[in-house]
Image (cartoon, rainbow, N blue to C red):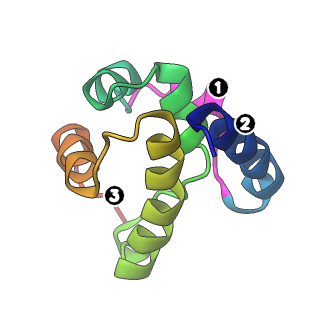
Amino acid sequence: MTRLTTILFALPMLAITGPAFAVSTPEQVLNDPNRPVEAVAGELGVTPLQFATCFAGVTPARTAAELDGQRERDNKATLLPCLQAINPDITNDRLDAVMDKYRAGPPRG
């Protein structure tokens, strides 16, 4: 499967599953004043819209109580393959490093 085919397949899947699980849309991610989308996207070698589209499928923790390993694994299972379909050079370690660099403080309970 070509990279473009993978992207074209993945994006509609996000649209189908997104409303049930995601807490945001790509537009909300792009306009979030607490998330430096342009900087994160630039370091990952994707456009801000591509990053926002992939991230819209993620369910971030809103409180410290929501932080758990399962949520992180579920979010990674959504975000990493979507980004890799756009830029196969993105590794798990690279994604972690970039996200950690730009992560805000822990959510407050």
The residue carrying mark 1 is 27
| Residue 17 to residue 67: above or below | above
Say whether residue 40 is magenta: no
Q: Residue at x 33, y 59 (%)?
A: 108
Residue 86, horizontal then vertical, whole percent: 50, 34
**Is residue 55 visible in the rendered structure shown here?**
no
Could you classify mark 1 by the number of other residues whose Cα lies within 10 Å: few (under 14), some (14-19), or many (20 or more)? few
Question: Which range is magenta?
Answer: 22-34
Residue type at tag 2: Leu
Q: What's the amino acid at mark 3?
A: Pro
Q: Which residue is mark 2?
A: 8
Q: Residue furthest right?
A: 16
Q: Earlier in the sequence, mark 1 or mark 3?
A: 1
Residue 62 rendering spot, x and y as whole percentages: 46, 59
**SS under mark 2:** helix
Q: Is residue 104 above or below residue 60?
A: above
Rate crowding at label 3 as few (under 14), some (14 to 19) or many (20 or more) other CA atoms within 10 Å.
few
Under circle 3, the secondary element is: loop
Residue underneath mark 3: 107
Q: Amino acid at mark 1?
A: Glu
